[in-house]
Image: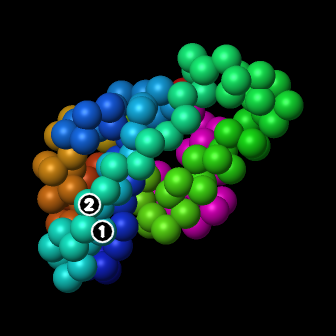
Amino acid sequence: MNNNFKIAFATNDGINTFAHFGRAKYFEVIEIENGNIKSRERREKPDFHSNAEHNHQHDHQGHHGRHSTILGLVKDCDFVVAGGMGYGIYDFLVSEGKTPIVTTVKNIDEALSLLVENKLENHIEKLH
């Protein structure tokens, strides 16, 4: 694996990977250079599930609009990690050249270490 990459973790607290990709409040975006953390930032993502304005927008945009919004937040990332996600966003991320990973590892730092070591398992059986 290349030791230089960016990864976005779906999270609510910046510490743990959130179990539901679509309901996470943030992406914790970490840039790795030569196997070490170069930068870390939190990007707020829209709440498509509880915001009435976005729900109205969804009626007009459908999944493609939501997926494009998400892609805009992780465009510079190589990996996108969550505790669970739907087939639609998973396939969309793959089609856009991203590597989505569904993990059972809760702690972001632990998952990051495993990814750097190329040992983070992708549990695609958790797709829904």
* Residue 97 numbered tag: none
| Residue shown at 75% from the left, 29% from the top | 58
Instruction: Please identify the dominant SS of the magenta region.
Output: helix
Q: What stretch is highlighted in magenta?
A: 86-100
The residue carrying pointer 1 sits among few (fewer than 14), some (14 to 19) or many (20 or more) residues within 10 Å by Cα, namely some
Task: Indicate yes or no whether the magenta region holds residue 34.
Answer: no
Q: Is mark 1 on a helix, strand or loop?
A: strand
Q: Mark 2 points at which residue?
A: 40
Q: Mark 1 points at which residue?
A: 31
- Residue 23 horizontal/vertical position (percent): 47, 27
Residue type, label 1: Glu
Query: Is residue 56 or residue 124 the one in the foreground?
Result: 56
Horizontal side of 96 relative to 126 (left or right) equals right
> From where the camera sits, is residue 93 visible?
no
- Residue 113 horizontal/vertical position (percent): 15, 59
Q: How far apart are marks 1 and 2 (CA)?
A: 6 Å
Q: In which quarter of the image is residue 18?
A: top left
